[in-house]
Image (cartoon, rainbow, N blue to C red):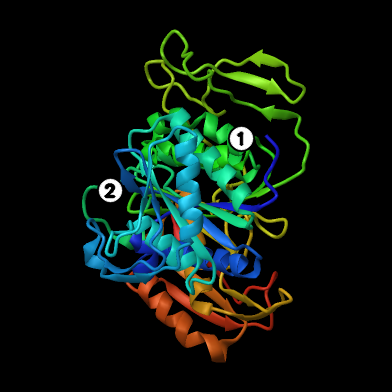
């Protein structure tokens, strides 16, 4: 299937209200909000005329629903996270496209209905995503529901119908999937400041999928969605990726970018960008499901390595290449993805979850029962993007948000400490470098007090002329192991 010239980019985003309403409660939530806002600026600079959104939080039971109310306006209180408050919303919906998408889905054999009722509730995921990605309603949106019973073929047909409707409509489109990765919420109260993915196995699977998405391998991810759904309790079985891949063309030719990955109440929340690319691949698909209606003998999936030239070679499993260890009985233990390199002879520590060092040094070094951390800034893991930067029309940095950068630095600090076997609570000394002491100290100090004030490590704050890369704050630390 040829690529549609009208699809500019696609994004996978989370939709929990925590990110919008309570980012100050958790460094991870704050980081997700900052990344959301950075993507919003990218969208604002684009020439997109439509945002098409599929949310796993808009459930439908009979067929598929399409929002066509041109100006839905209401007050949302999330049924699970009501304590975070109200979200008033008013959106600009592209009714014409919604009707066209609905008609196209019907033509292709799907059960479909348009929804145009005052007060019809819009789900939390859609509200969070649109308010953060398109806060001024500059681009009209269209929203389609997630049928909780639709399987792979039906969901793919819904995606292909979207692609057909976009091509007929003739307007440049940004596609958004609102879905978590792993979806195992914590079932008891937690300290948001210490939020983490609730299962180490889920975290490992999330990271492997993000690695694949960062390489632009969207169709490979779609092919392993069932296995991911079983192993990591994926959001709605991760069916959103079937819809997205079918809409985008069912291949791996994308430029991928992982903007962020953080926990939200135990779930895996990521922001991922996929841009159609003309790059050539050695392997068109690494994974491929059995054709519809032809399950293997166990009723599961069959896997092939598919060469770009069309040949196939059998592969043993659909599971991503995650290292396994043996448990005490000699049986394979849960899959483990090595997230930290700790060279015992030298004590050097390199975390795969933290932004890469910008020089020839490790993230940390163990000496006795102490851990010495190199200076760490606010750059984002996986992308090295700097949150909180404000750019002009020529993409030049003209300002920055020290609060956003401070939260991101402490989030990175937390990651390195945990991957090295320590924690924020074991900090004993922190050195802070600010490029504008007069302007930024008060704001930085407030965030620091919020996130580290109860821990009370010793601290030295130093004003400097500049830091490597255009960041405005850096921290180095010593912690106990």
Picture coordinates of residue 162, whole percent (x, y): 53, 44
Distance between the alpha carbons at the discs numbered 2 and 1: 34 Å
Which of the labelled discs sits on residue 430, or is there none?
none
In which quadrant is the N terminus drawn? top right
Picture coordinates of residue 196, whole percent (x, y): 38, 51
Quick check: 313 left or right of 98? Answer: right
Please determine whether, in this image, residue 299 is positioned above or below residue 57. above
Residue bearing mark 1: 250
Picture coordinates of residue 277, whole percent (x, y): 73, 46
Quick check: 425 left or right of 262? Answer: left
Can residue 205 be seen by looking at this rendering?
no
Please determine whether, in this image, residue 433 is positioned above or below residue 221. below
In the image shown, does 37 or 48 lie closer to the viewer?
48
Please determine whether, in this image, residue 272 is positioned above or below residue 136. above
In the image shown, does 380 or 39 lie closer to the viewer?
39
At x 59%, y 34%, the residue is: 219
Quick check: 46 left or right of 427? Answer: right
At x 23%, y 47%, the residue is: 187
At x 66%, y 65%, the residue is: 47
Residue bearing mark 2: 186
Q: Residues within 10 Å of mark 1 (few under 14, many from 20)?
A: many
Query: Foreground mark, 2 or 1?
Result: 1
């Amino acid at each position: 299937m040829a690529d549609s010239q009208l699809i500019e980019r696609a994004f996978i985003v989370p939709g929990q209200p925590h990110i919008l309403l309570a980012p100050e409660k958790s460094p991870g939530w704050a980081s997700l909000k900052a990344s959301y806002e950075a993507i919003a600026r990218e969208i604002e600079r684009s020439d997109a005329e439509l945002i098409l959104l599929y949310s796993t939080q808009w459930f439908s039971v009979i067929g598929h629903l399409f929002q066509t109310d041109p100006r839905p306006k209401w007050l949302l209180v999330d049924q699970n996270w009501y304590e975070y408050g109200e979200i008033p919303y008013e959106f600009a919906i592209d009714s014409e496209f919604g009707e066209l998408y609905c008609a196209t889905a019907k033509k292709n054999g799907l059960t479909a209905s348009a929804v145009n009722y005052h007060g019809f509730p819009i789900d939390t995921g859609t509200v969070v995503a649109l308010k953060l990605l398109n806060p001024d309603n500059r681009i009209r949106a269209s929203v389609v529901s997630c049928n909780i019973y639709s399987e792979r073929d039906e969901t793919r047909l819904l995606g292909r119908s979207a692609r057909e409707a976009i091509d007929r409509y003739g307007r440049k489109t940004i596609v958004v999937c609102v879905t978590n990765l792993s979806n195992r919420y914590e079932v008891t109260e937690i300290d948001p400041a210490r939020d983490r993915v609730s299962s180490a196995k889920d975290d490992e699977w999330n990271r492997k999928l993000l690695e694949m998405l960062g390489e632009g391998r969207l169709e490979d991810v779609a092919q392993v969605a069932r296995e991911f759904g079983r192993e990591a309790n994926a959001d709605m079985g991760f069916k959103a990726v079937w819809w997205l891949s079918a809409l985008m063309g069912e291949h791996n030719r994308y430029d991928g970018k992982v903007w962020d990955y953080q926990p939200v109440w135990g779930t895996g929340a990521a922001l991922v960008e996929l841009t159609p690319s003309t790059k050539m691949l050695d392997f068109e698909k690494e994974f491929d499901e059995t054709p519809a209606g032809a399950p293997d003998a166990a009723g599961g999936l069959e896997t092939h390595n598919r060469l770009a030239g069309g040949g196939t070679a059998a592969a043993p499993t659909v599971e991503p290449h995650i290292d396994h260890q043996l448990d005490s009985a000699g049986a394979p233990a849960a899959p483990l993805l090595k997230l930290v390199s700790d060279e015992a002879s030298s004590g050097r520590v390199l975390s795969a979850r933290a932004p890469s060092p910008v020089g020839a040094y490790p993230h940390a070094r163990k000496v006795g029962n102490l851990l010495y951390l190199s200076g760490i800034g606010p750059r984002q893991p996986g992308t090295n993007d700097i949150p909180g930067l404000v750019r002009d029309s020529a993409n030049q940095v003209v300002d920055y948000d020290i609060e956003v950068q401070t939260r991101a630095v402490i989030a990175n600090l937390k990651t390195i400490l945990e991957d090295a076997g320590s924690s924020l609570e074991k900090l004993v000394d922190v050195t802070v470098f600010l490029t504008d002491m007069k302007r930024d100290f008060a704001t930085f100090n407030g965030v620091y007090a919020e996130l580290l004030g109860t821990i009370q490590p010793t601290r030295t704050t130093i004003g400097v002329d500049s830091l490597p890369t255009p960041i405005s704050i850096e921290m180095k630390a010593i912690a106990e192991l």
